[in-house]
Image: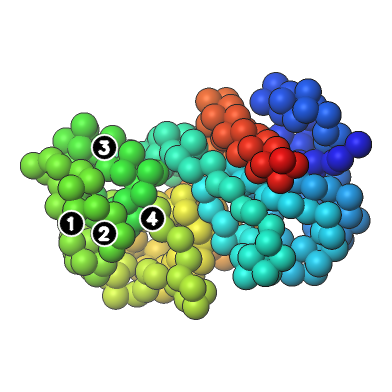
Amino acid sequence: MSRILVTPRSLSRGGHPGLEPLLKAGFELVTPTPGATPSESDLIRVLPGCVGWIAGVEPVSEKAIEAAADLRAISRNGSGVDNLPMHILEAKDITVCRAQATNARGVAELALTLAMAGLRNVVPTHVGMKSGDWPRRIGREIQGAKVGVIGLGAIGAEFVDFCLMLGAAVHGFDPFAPEDLIIHENFGRKNFDAVFDGADVVSLHAPMQKNGNPLVNSANLAAMAEGGVLVNTARAGLVDVEALLNALDSGQIGTYATDVFEAEPPEPSRLLSHPSVILTSHIGGFTRESVQRSTERAVSNLLKVLSTDAD
């Protein structure tokens, strides 16, 4: 029986109905680390004999792919592929499919939640009350706020729509998005640096640069409105950590809210323990609806490739 590797944490515990079509097609499902991110050694151990792979955000090394002698296709249950060694996959003629835009709503909703939490000081107020205090930090409303958005793909565009509906003035940057993607009197396109100028909120929805360097630097943070909110539901490496810590310590950035980390779960650090940082455990696309849409698309994409190969 041909085997399919299933590694997304939202699926690897088994039993998700979206995986049923694979079982009905006669495949055996392999889940080496149920509910957890597999290591390189886990992948190397189970990949031999697998013809397909429903993959999550786990790092995939060249060494793991070298062990995948039978692999014909990888189907991501999301849109990002920067965790995959694409040059090796292309050289080995392994097809890579993406479930594009299926988790956009879930991630955009979380980004909005984090932005609002930062604007209204929800977390420090909660923590203060839990400790017996009565903190009352003045916040600000999103209506009339200046919001910058880096990346206008499916998630970024959805986030823009939310902010516009709430009355924010939004500026976006994306060199690849069509100019007519978003037409609204309160929305405009700007260059990268200008998006930060005077912004009360900046939300990141971009991939990493090919050279691996951060996108957001000290000058960008200094250009934001004092006490601004920086939201990152995209990639941890997009922000220069030392510049961010300096901005948080000085109060120039009032809140950094992130759903993404260099390693998951992350190691303790000064950034993670900073009182002005809000942390969520990569739950942007972890909603029942997003997982269902992503799983259905990933399974459909994989079956299409494998059935085509069989013909």
| Amino acid type assigned to the residue bearing label 2 in the image | Phe
Give the CA distance from mark 1 to mark 3.
14 Å
| Amino acid type assigned to the residue bearing label 4 in the image | Leu
Element on which disc 1 rests:
strand
Q: Name the residue under label 4.
A: 204
Residue 24 in the image: state x and y as whole percent. 78, 23
Task: Check if mark 2's residue and mark 4's residue have beta carbons within 8 Å.
Answer: no
Q: Which numbered disc flags the more N-terminal residue, 3 or 2? A: 3
Residue 109 in the image: state x and y as whole percent. 41, 35
Residue 115 visible in the snapshot: no
Task: Check if mark 2's residue and mark 1's residue have beta carbons within 8 Å.
Answer: yes
Q: Label 1 crowding class (10 Å Cα cut-off): few <14, some 14-19, many 20+?
A: some
Q: Name the residue under label 3.
A: 161
Q: Which numbered disc flags the more N-terminal residue, 1 or 3? A: 3
Q: Name the outermost residue toward the left.
A: 185
Q: Which numbered disc flags the more N-terminal residue, 2 or 4? A: 2
Nearer the viewer's eye, disc 2 or disc 4? 2
Q: Mark 2 points at which residue?
A: 173
Element on which disc 2 rests:
strand
Residue 299 in the image: state x and y as whole percent. 65, 34
Q: Name the residue under label 1.
A: 189
| Amino acid type assigned to the residue bearing label 1 in the image | Arg
Q: Label 2 crowding class (10 Å Cα cut-off): few <14, some 14-19, many 20+?
A: many
From this view, report whether residue 37 is shown above or below residue 4: below
Give the CA distance from mark 3 to mark 2.
15 Å
Q: How is the image coloured?
A: rainbow
